[in-house]
Amino acid sequence: MFSTDYPPPSSLSLFLSLDMASSYLFQSPNFSSNLKLPTKPHTLKATPRFLSIKAAAASSSSNTPANTASKGNNIRDEARRQYLTNPPQNQNFSAKYVPFNTDPVTNTESYSLDEIVYRSQSGGLLDVQHDMSALKAFPGSYWRALFDSRVGKTTWPYGSGVWSKKEWVLPEISGDDIVSAFEGNSNLFWAERFGKQFLEMNDLWVKHCGISHTGSFKDLGMTVLVSQVNRLRKMNRPVFGVGCASTGDTSAALSAYCASAGIPSIVFLPANKISIAQLVQPIANGAFVLSIDTDFDGCMQLIREVTSELPIYLANSLNSLRLEGQKTAAIEILQQFDWEVPDWVIVPGGNLGNIYAFYKGFNMCKELGLVDKIPRLVCAQAANANPLYLYYKSGWDEFKAVKANSTFASAIQIGDPVSIDRAVYALKQSNGIVEEATEEELMDATAQADSTGMFICPHTGVALTALMKLRKSGVIGPTDRTVVVSTAHGLKFTQSKIDYHSNNIKEMACRFANPPVSVKADFGSVMDVLKKYLSKTPK
């Protein structure tokens, strides 16, 4: 065993390369799995000294890598062996449910995460509250180094972008109970051409959360929720299965993670309102799927009633556990910018849990000293399902649910969002903005983005439309570092793209359609078409 005190972050990499001159440290998963948290709070002096991180080195008598030390073990077995061989010190990290947005000093209502509860005594939302005093015992430099050390590893469960922040997510869960597909760690894409060509911006980025196990950001929350359900079932709590109402992506994530853990999943889908690609995912993963003749809000009402009567655990974002996983995307953005804070983050909004999750992730980083500010948040809604936008435009005067009309951004076709209070809180705390996109605007933006090499979902088109409007009005400047959150993979929404490029959408000009050109199978005809095309192509 050895330990080292971290120097100030600015010289961290140089210090590691010179004074920790053992390349094995960086090759071994022990660096990520056995980082030790001191048992006592660290007292910062005038010139800060940083916390020790200890890592177990392999025995000098053996050259066997730690992750294959016990031949035949899988990564979960190896994590268990490491835990038993070198158990962690008492870290005293914990979390609990509390009523949303209550004073932590005066509030007396709380629940263990092992309780099955979705609402407070007053009927309001719950939030997962971490023991911030325990987390604050360690400086921001410690957390930055810990999280960075786990990126790109296969050590269970820290190879996941969610579980690499386990201490901030579900600190008390055992690795044996975690259900993970190593989700997260998604691409942060520099949208160079789109930014320059359409927005005159040079620092535009797209966080591709859709590059994930089931093709959407919902994986980030579902790994947390299903892991907790797995724990509850092992504790013999009355949980037969897990259920959700869904516009597509939630059901895909739920069914996949439940299938991985052998837990029954039950899905309520609005009939004829989601894409075939979204519908086939829960079916293929063995979920019990009910196609119900109503919209998402109707499905949501039914699943809430059913889960109050049957031993089915509610998986919708009313359940605040999912937001603990989703907030890690915000932390990832900061990591990917080397812990520099962007100016703006734009998030599509439907049921509105995600905008709060991003706020929570950014704010935890600020509160725990990893960064010194948070970005301004923008929530982007489809004009056909825009209750938050209308509420914002009224000056937060009075919230009114709406009847959501059909939109190509089907995952956010929600008129009575569960997390409205969470979203409003996040926007007010971040000096945020709400924008909307019509159907034509969002489809045009999608086509423009695709023409620059992306392949985005319509929901990302909503977010890009919001960016275009804010850029045009001068709210977002040409040099502002801006991140657009892409929530799902474009391959889930190919029919909308086919209809657009076929000019087959009623009352839509489809200005950027790029249909195939029919041509006779002879050389002269092909040459004529190509010459005409080349003459129009910018040089």
Image (cartoon, rainbow, N blue to C red):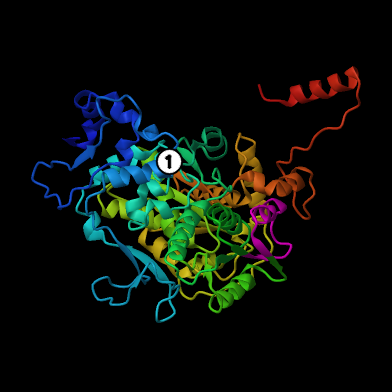
The residue stretch that appears in magenta: 267-289
- Crowd band around label 1 with a 10 angstrom C-alpha radius: few (<14), some (14–19), many (20+): some
Specify whether residue 221 is in view: yes
In the image, residue 364 lies at what x, y percent? 32, 55
In which image quadrant can residue 8 be found?
top left
The reply to whether the magenta stretch includes residue 427 is no
In which image quadrant can residue 255 be found?
bottom right
Asked whether 297 or 507 is in front, the reply is 297
At 22% across and 47% down in the image, what residue appears?
37
> Which residue lies under the disc numbered 1?
75
Q: Which residue is outermost to the left?
A: 46
Asked whether 508 or 145 is in front, the reply is 145
Tell whether 506 sits left or right of 444.
right
Q: Secondary structure at mark 1?
A: helix
At 28% across and 72% down in the image, what residue appears?
103
Asked whether 49 or 416 is in front, the reply is 49
In the image, residue 199 lies at what x, y percent? 53, 40
At 56% across and 54% down in the image, what residue appears?
253
Specify whether residue 327 is in view: no
In the image, residue 89 lies at what x, y percent? 22, 50
At 72% across and 65% down in the image, what residue appears?
271
In the image, residue 242 lies at what x, y percent? 55, 65
In which image quadrant can residue 453 be found?
top right
Tell whether 331 sits left or right of 284.
left
Asked whether 434 or 475 is in front, the reply is 434
In the picture, the quarter occupied by the N terminus is top left
Q: Is residue 493 above or below residue 5?
A: below
Q: Is residue 414 above or below residue 197?
A: below
